[in-house]
Every structure is written in C-alpha cells, then in structure tokens.
Amino acid sequence: MTNTYPPSTIDGLLHNNRAWAATAVREDAQFFKRLAEQQAPKYLWIGCSDSRVPANQITGMQPGEVFVHRNIANVVVHADLNCLSVMQFAVDVLKVEHIIVCGHYGCGGVHAVLNDTRVGLADNWLRHVGDVAQKHGALLARSGSNEHRHALLCDLNAIEQAVNVCQTTVVRDAWARGQTLSVHGWVYALRDGLLRTLTPGIDGTDAIEPAYQASLARLECDVASGESPGSAMS
C-alpha cells in the first residue's frame, strides 16, 4: 500500500524527499556519490529570502552548482559577518568565478520601505534599503505609478548591493591577486519567471564606476520614456 501525503505536511516533505532521491539515482546512479565527494560551484548567488525566488530552479542548476546566501531584500552590508563569511568561503576556498546579486519585483522588503510599513526587528535591516531609496529619491519621484516606483527601487537596490559586493575586501583582494571574478546585478520577475540583467559584469576595481553609471543611465532613460522598469532588460 502506498501512502500519500499532502505536500504541505511534514510527512509530505519527507515523502517528497524520498521520491526525489530515488528519481535522481534512477537518472544518474553516481549523482549523490559526486555530491558527497565535493562541491565545485562557479557561482555565488546573493538573493532575497522570498520563497518564490529559488536560485537553483530559476537558473536551471543542480545541487552543487551554485553557492547560495539569502536574506531579506538581498542586502549586502559590510558589517554583516554572515554574508561576508559566505562570500569569503565562496571566493577564497571554492574559487567561484561569478557573484550574482539578484533582487526581484514584488519584494516585500522593498514594499515595506516605500510604504513606511513597520514590520518589527526587520525594520533595522530594511533601513539599508531605505538608504538606497533616499539616495535615489529624485529618480524615484519621477517614476510614475506606485508599481513602477516599487520596481525601480527593486532595480536600484540590486545595483547598489552589487556595488557593495565589489567594495568588500574579499572581492578587492581577489582582484588584486589576479583571480577571475565578476560581479553581476540581476533582477527576477515573478510575472514571467525571467531574469534580467541590471549591470554589466564587473571584473575589477576600475570597472565598478563605469558599470554603476551605465546601469543608472539605463534606468534614467526608462523613467524618462515612461517605460516600466525591467521591460526592456534582458
């Protein structure tokens, strides 16, 4: 007799795990053997904790192919030892070649900032997103509807956090010793499941400012033309 469980129950999760493991072995008998021996990801993903934005699934990568750090609103803070430790291990030990900071439209943290909504302890964390909103207040004020303003702040936040990654000693030291490493700012659209590029790949200290200015210029053009943020990005 086969037991069936609702997927939303704890027993359902365990049942789904066994089914997934069996399928993985059936498709590749050496799958778990390889995973147990090592991980060799080329990518570090810094994303939002939102359950609708799973790094592996939306990029089509398997376990072991992407190293992941997530927090509310994909924020990178120079005093956050959690994030910095993940970054240091990824860059210095795993030798990842790309760091991706990925925001997403419909972000609850961004929504809370724009609407000045108190959510509790996380208010202190979201102050970093508030700093981004304050820095780009003039551009946000010209962005039209609340929906456009929300999407624009999602874009701006991902760009600013990608620049923050570039400013860490972890990344700067890697570049100084000639290590291959590029930093990317992306955004994910829940409405169509597509990722969009916000910044060109930043592969050295000299590339930070040109990439930053180019990214902001593109957003400025979108706002000036009345185009919805993200609609022209690929």
Image (cartoon, rainbow, N blue to C red):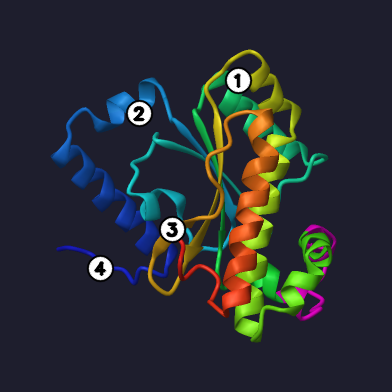
- The mark that comes first in sequence, 2 or 3, is 2
- Please indicate whether residue 67 sits to the left or right of residue 57 in the image: right
Q: Amino acid at mark 2?
A: Leu
| Rendered image: mark on residue 35 | 2
Residue drawn 61% across the image and 26% down it: 89
Residue drawn 45% across the image and 51% down it: 55
Q: Amino acid at mark 1?
A: Asp
* Quadrant in which the C terminus appears: bottom left
Mark 2 to mark 3 CA distance (whole Å): 27 Å
Instruction: Classify 199 as above or below 2.
Output: above
Q: How many marks overall? A: 4
Identify the residue position indicated by label 3 in the image: 195
**Badge 3: residue crowd in 10 Å (few <14, some 14–19, many ≥20):** some
User: Which residue is nearer to you in this view: 44 or 150?
Assistant: 150
Q: Position of residue 91 (x, y in %)?
A: 58, 25
Mark 1 to mark 2 CA distance (whole Å): 20 Å
Q: Amino acid at mark 3?
A: Leu
| Rendered image: mark on residue 4 | 4
Q: Position of residue 120 (x, y in %)?
A: 82, 70
Check disc 2 and report its element: helix, strand or loop.
helix
**Badge 4: residue crowd in 10 Å (few <14, some 14–19, many ≥20):** few
* Quadrant in which the N terminus appears: bottom left
User: Which residue is nearer to you in this view: 224 or 197?
Assistant: 224
